[in-house]
Amino acid sequence: MNHDEIKTCCADAYAKDAVALLLGDSYHPGGLTLTRHLADHLQLAGDARVLDVASGRGTTALLLADVYGARVDGVDYAPANTALAQGAAQAAGMAERAVFVTGDAEHLPYEGGVFDAVVCECALCTFPDKARAAAEFARVLGPGGRVGITDVTADPDRLPPELSGLGARIACVADARPLPEYADILAAAGLHTRHTERHDTAMLRMIDQIEARLNLLRLTGPARLAEAGVDLAAATDILAAARTAVADGLLGYALLIAVKSP
């Protein structure tokens, strides 16, 4: 499978109702609480211009626009997500402060130097060309602009087979990297890490949440799981392997703040 096929597969998967069925409104560990924590570290001034890369259905972008007063552009690879995010912005009366387009994180559809901050939550790990995406983050930021990332971390050489296939890639695990490697990728693009935090417990809470919803739906809505294309056996195996990997220190979640050189 080539890079474009991988991106399309991941984007299509996250646009499906199955994801909302299992994850709820926020598609990453830590939910909106961690998003707020990330935004606080970015020290967003009123009317800051922010780019949300892999914006999904618009949850993060709408929070930044509503609570922090930012002008947010969201870009996502899946047209279905773009449409849903635009609809959510209109319904919330924030269509002028949160604008969404379909685009590729590795080829961002924006001019250089126009953003004060870039956020990317639980998505860099899925990008086939992380270095290219980091270079794009740097290109669209103005001097001194900041990048805020929350993402899955992993020791890829030691992950079990259940966490190395396409399904695990879609689950943000298979191509995740150690936290220092993310910092190195950003540094090569001129983005220098200023702060990092571990949030591995957030990963365990999300595993618990997905497992609980799977068990409930197995009893009350097996037809919904089937219609959503959820493979119960595969999902159960991935969750069990992920829980063990977190306990063994091979898998986790982290926050990272980086700054573009003036």
Image: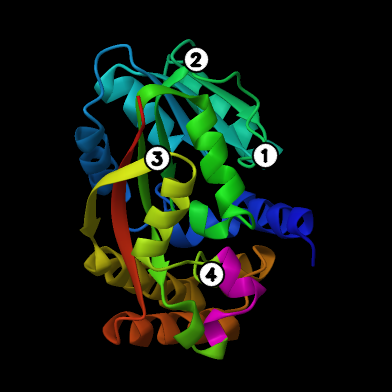
Q: State which tag comes first along the sequence, 4 or 1.
A: 1
Q: Nearer the viewer, residue 192 or 21?
A: 192
Q: Give the spatial CA distance, label 3 vs label 2.
A: 30 Å
- For residue 147, what is the image quadrant? top left
Boundaries of the magenta span: 162-170
In what element is the residue under mark 1? helix
Question: According to the image, label 4 marks what residue?
Answer: 221
Label tally: 4
**Residue 95 circle label:** 2
Which element is circle 2 on? loop
What residue is at 21 percent from the left and 42 percent from the top?
37
**Circle 1 residues within 10 Å: few <14, some 14–19, many ≥20:** some
Frontmost of labels 4 and 1 is: 1
Are dots 2 and 1 in contact, CB under 8 Å? no
Q: Is residue 15 magenta?
A: no
Please name the amino acid that badge 1 sits on.
Answer: Ala
Which of labels 2 and 4 is toward the front? 2
